[in-house]
Image: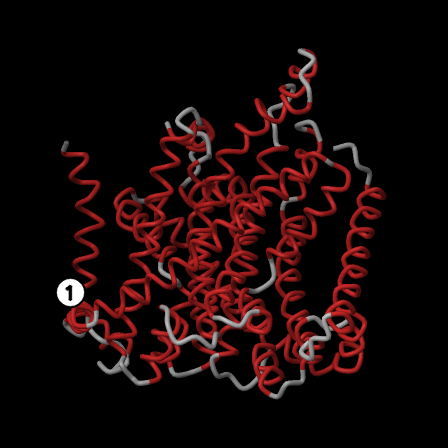
Amino acid sequence: MELTRKDRRIVTGVWLLSIIVLWELLSAFLLYVVQDNMASSKLPFPHDVLMTFISEWQTLLVAGIVTLSRAGLGFAIGGLIGIILAVIMSLSKVAEKIAFPYLIVSQMIPVLGLAPIIFNIVRDMNMSRIVIAAYITFFPVAVNMLSGFKSVEEEKKELMRSIAANRVDIYLKLMFPYSLPYLFTGLKIAAPMAVTASILVDMLGSKSGIGVKILYSLYSSSFDIFWASVFTSAFMGILSYNIVIFAERLMIPWKNVTTTKVGDK
Amino acid sequence: MRERIMRFFWPISFGILLLLLWEFGVVHHLLDLKSFQLPVPSEIATSLFENYKQAFRDMFITVSGALIGLAIGSFLGFSIAVVATIFPKWGFGGMILVTALNAVPIVALSPIMNLWFRTGMLQKIGVVTVVCMAAMAINAYYGMNDLKPFSIDLMHSAAASRWLIFKKLRLPNCLPNVFTALRINIASSIIAAIISEYFATSTAGLGFGIKDNLRKAEMAMGWSYIVVASLAGVILYLFIVLVERDVIKWHASQR
């Protein structure tokens, strides 16, 4: 579309503002017209939630960082496993034939459903958090990376071979740079999921983290903290996605240039 | 023919090997686990066989909730994409918000839906709806607007109305993306339904079954629920893939 940057900002701003206003109206409707005595828990006023944010920002930040850092560790490990797996599958046809169907099936297994079982096996909150986040991350990374490797034209590989480049060189100088955009597609899918996994493990019986805060505030009926925690976890998901986008811009500076030139945007 | 046999031979033999290693304790030995922590496949199969009625009843509850949420959510998401395409300027901002919604963790939605809805079924449908809506809206919007260069110019040059452009160009163009979204949604709807059952007040469904059996230390039963959940996911996934193959035969990804 022919939207300028400024236009985009205005449009998004108006949207946000109108949603907040609508929310205020709905909360007021629930509280004063329907006279629902659960109104403040079902749909609190946005400004109330904001006030809670301001008064509780420290504990929320600490809890958020605990959850996010563990998600990040599992995310990094899972990403690494995914890349290694993709390299192995691109090197050996047999390995690909063995692994690929299982990759698809492993995606169908409700991984987050496995959370209590994994917790039962490793018996350690941090460990199971990392395992689950890694498990969730490796699939989209491996699949996307592999399709990146496969989309390298044969001519390019032949050119590398014709100048006597060895396998390591071909991977380092051709395959990896070429499939970076694919890798980031996978990472973008995985990042919010890793955060979700981390929060879920929080809820299943951890001692610290944002998930614990959500559950405890819910049990103790302190709904203002509950809503502030829910919003924090939503921000964490969005943040993780944006961190990946930021890393993508840093590592693939050429991508933005090409996408703005090609196509009708 | 040989090619086809080999295609199945490798993965299946690998799977059998893995099951055997698991059955005869090699996996336990490697990971330093006791058999009560990780039951062996034969135990899981027996407990599934003994309790299959209960397991399938729970599966039915979870899957029906997931499918209803999937249908509502996908419909809403598609409608959002259509509206955003009709009003490009304002629709763009709306899509940014939907993208943000996509990053909201399922586990955070679940308690909110608990507050809003009384029954476990409605709560489950609510969670699944929100999860599926975002993925469908993003993919469909992308498909409707990521057109081949000049195709829209061609439509304009033939004096096509906006409705005609939508019907003949945008709609067919977004079909592959819609199916991608459906495939994503099948997997995530079942996961979302199971997770919402962890926190729901209801006492039925796969999520409740997994949690309850683990609490009672019935590990084999918990695992058989996982098997049932995966089976449901795989069957639904295959169903979507088959429909997709039929509907978008013309697309490059199907050839």
> Looking at the image, can residue B18 be seen?
yes
Does B216 appear above or below B159?
Answer: below
Residue A235: x and y in percent read 67, 65
Q: Observer-nearest residue: B110 or A35?
A: A35
- The quarter of the picture where residue A208 lies is bottom right
Residue B156: x and y in percent read 69, 16
Does B148 appear above or below B38?
Answer: above
**Residue at point 38% right, 74% down?**
B208
Does B29 appear above or below B122?
Answer: below
Q: Observer-nearest residue: B145 or A68?
A: B145
Q: Name the residue furthest bottom.
A: A220
Residue A19: x and y in percent read 76, 57
> Looking at the image, can residue A68 be seen?
no
Q: Observer-nearest residue: B133 or A232?
A: B133
- The quarter of the picture where residue A134 lies is bottom left
**Residue at point 42% right, 53% down?**
B67
- The quarter of the picture where residue B6 lies is top left
Neighbour class for label 1 at 10 Å: few (<14), some, many (≥20)? some
**Residue at point 37% right, 72% down?**
B204
Q: Quadrant of the N terminus of chain B?
A: top left
* SS type, badge 1: helix
Q: Observer-nearest residue: B53 or B20?
A: B53
Name the amino acid, label 1: Leu
Q: Is residue A139 left or right of residue A22?
A: left
Number of numbered discs visible in the structure rendering = 1
Residue denoted by label 1: B20
**Residue at point 84% right, 47% down?**
A10
Q: Is residue A221 left or right of residue A16?
A: left
Q: Quadrant of the C terminus of chain B?
A: top left
Instruction: Give the chain of mark 1.
Output: B
Residue B221: x and y in percent read 25, 75
